[in-house]
Image: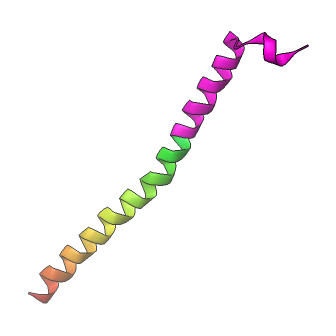
Amino acid sequence: MNFKERGVTVGDLVILLIVIIFSFFIIDKIKEPKTQKQITNLYQLEIQKNISE
């Protein structure tokens, strides 16, 4: 089968869509701990400010 003449099929688009959605969730999971860590650090800084006052 000559793939250059085949063109893009519905199956190709479905696989591409699955890869895009999968990568979106992986990136979201990677960013979530960083955001949670920033919130925790900010909370700890506020506690230290209140203690030192």
Q: Image quarter for residue 23?
A: top right
Q: Residue at x 38, y 65 (%)?
A: 37
Seen in the picture, residue 30 relative to 1 is either above or below; the reply is: below
- Quadrant showing the C terminus: bottom left
Q: Quadrant of residue 43?
A: bottom left
- The image shows residue 27, relative to residue 43, as above or below, that is above
User: Would you say the magenta stretch is mainly helix, strand or loop?
Assistant: helix
Residue lying at 37% horizontally and 59% vertically, measured from the top left: 36
Q: Quadrant of residue 22?
A: top right
Give the x, y percent position of residue 8: 69, 14
Residue lying furthest right in this view?
1
- Judging depth in this view, the residue of 47 and 8 nearest the camera is 8
Residue lying at the far front of the rendered structure: 5
Residue at point 30% right, 62% down?
Answer: 39
| The stretch drawn in magenta includes residue 46 | no
Residue 34 placement, left or right of 16 = left
Q: Is residue 8 magenta?
A: yes
* Residue 14 position in % (x across, y down): 64, 18
In this view of the protein, which residue sits in the foreground, 40 or 35? Answer: 35
Tell me if residue 12 comes above or below residue 26 in the rendering. above
- Count of numbered labels shown in the rendering: 0
Q: Which residues are magenta?
A: 1-24
Q: Residue at x 51, y 46 (%)?
A: 27
